[in-house]
Amino acid sequence: MSNVIRKEDAHKLVDQLPANATWDDLMHEIYVREAIERGMEDSNAGRTKDVKEIRKKYGLPE
């Protein structure tokens, strides 16, 4: 994953926060975005597993 961000993306992220947002709110948004980007990269690279496979592995109902 690339650690490079565009300033425009950072500005959009901050601009979408409410006026009374805290640093914790900002950090949460950054974390969520990073998690989504990593998941998309894994998916695009074929590094995913089917939900049924995971449920079977952990003995969960389908």
Image (cartoon, rainbow, N blue to C red):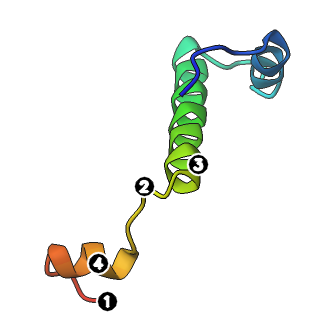
In the picture, residue 21 is in which quadrant? Answer: top right
Precedes in sequence: disc 1 or disc 4:
4
Residue highlighted by disc 2: 47
Residue highlighted by disc 1: 62
- Residue found at the far front of this picture: 45
Amino acid at circle 1: Glu
Precedes in sequence: disc 2 or disc 1:
2
In the picture, residue 30 is in which quadrant? Answer: top right
Q: Which of marks 3 and 1 is in front?
A: 3
Distance Cα–Cα, label 2 vs label 1: 21 Å
Identify which residue is drawn at 56% across, 44% down: 41
Is disc 3 placed on a helix, strand or loop?
Answer: helix
Precedes in sequence: disc 3 or disc 4:
3
- Residue found at the far bottom of this picture: 62
In the picture, residue 57 is in which quadrant? Answer: bottom left
Amino acid at circle 3: Met
Residue 40 located left or right of residue 47: right
Q: Which of 56 and 12 is in front in this view?
A: 56
Residue highlighted by disc 3: 40
Tags 3 and 4 touching, CB below 8 Å: no
Distance Cα–Cα, label 3 vs label 4: 19 Å
Q: Which of marks 1 and 4 is in front?
A: 4
Distance Cα–Cα, label 3 vs label 1: 24 Å
Q: Which of marks 2 and 1 is in front?
A: 2
Is disc 1 placed on a helix, strand or loop?
Answer: loop
Identify which residue is drawn at 31% across, 89% down: 62
Precedes in sequence: disc 3 or disc 1:
3
- Mark 1 is surrounded, within 10 Å at the Cα level, by few (under 14), some (14 to 19) or many (20 or more) other residues, namely few
Please provide percent x and percent y for residue 26.
61, 20
Amino acid at circle 2: Arg
- Mark 2 is surrounded, within 10 Å at the Cα level, by few (under 14), some (14 to 19) or many (20 or more) other residues, namely few
- Say which mark, if any, is on residue 53: 4
